[in-house]
Amino acid sequence: MCRGLESLPGTCLERAKELKALFGSLLQKSDHNISGQTKKFEKLRVNVDEPLNWKDSFEKLLSSQNGLCLFRAFLISEFSEENISFYLACEDYRSSKPSKMAAKAKKIFEEFISCDAPREVNLDHVTKAITKDNLEHPCQSTFDLAQAKIYTLMEKDCYPRFLKNLSPADLIKPYPPITREM
């Protein structure tokens, strides 16, 4: 297993593999009897239409727990997992208590934005400078510009490759609803 995949929580990696196998088999066989898959769906708590929603927009992918898990696993395989980690760290930061914002902002900046950051994201020097200036007075919008740039990068670059990996032609095929066998 590559070093990048080791950093992914084991449960997320296992879930990503299960989902990819499950959705892959559903998406490749239009005449597939899905009723035999019902127990797997109940266990995973997924909806057959869920991958179809991921194709609609990047935001829908990120709002889906299963979609986010698969997207993160994909980014790890592409050696760009720092992008989604930074994005999620910013989301977490935005909901932090004001008393903890300064410490969290410093940690996020040092991990993802500074020149020597271990997981440096791809930001231009102007965005880095603005974000560094924002650290003087941390607030909910401290990372808004940097987060928006990384979101756009993922949406325009990583997301299309992710969809291609899931075979987008198959995502638009209609499938019969799941029926329970008695």
Image (spheres, helix red, strand yellow):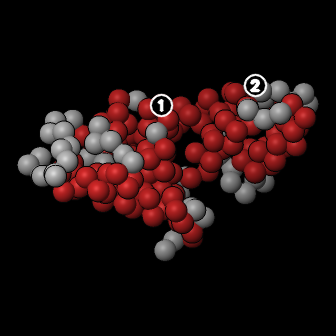
Asked whether the viewer can see residue 132, the reply is no
Is 56 situated left or right of 101 in this image? left
Residue shown at 91%/30% (left/top)? Answer: 136
Residue shown at 20%/48% (left/top)? Answer: 180
User: Mark 1 is on which residue type?
Assistant: Glu
Q: Secondary structure at mark 2?
A: loop
Is 182 situated left or right of 92 in this image? left
Outermost residue, left side: 31
Instruction: Measuring from the top left, give residue 2's x and y in whole percent.
Output: 51, 71
First in residue order: circle 2 vs circle 1: 1
The residues bearing labels 2 and 1 have C-alpha atoms spaced at a distance of: 19 Å
Instruction: Measuring from the top left, give residue 143's x and y in whole percent.
Output: 73, 32
User: Mark 2 is on which residue type?
Assistant: Ser
Relative depth, front residue between 26 and 158: 26
Task: Identify the residue position indicated by label 1 in the image.
Answer: 59
Is 67 situated left or right of 48 in this image? right
Task: Identify the residue position indicated by label 2 in the image.
Answer: 141
Residue shown at 14%/39% (left/top)? Answer: 176
Outermost residue, bottom side: 1
Q: Secondary structure at mark 1?
A: helix
Question: Are there few (<14), some (14-19), or many (20+) residues within 10 Å of tag 2?
Answer: few
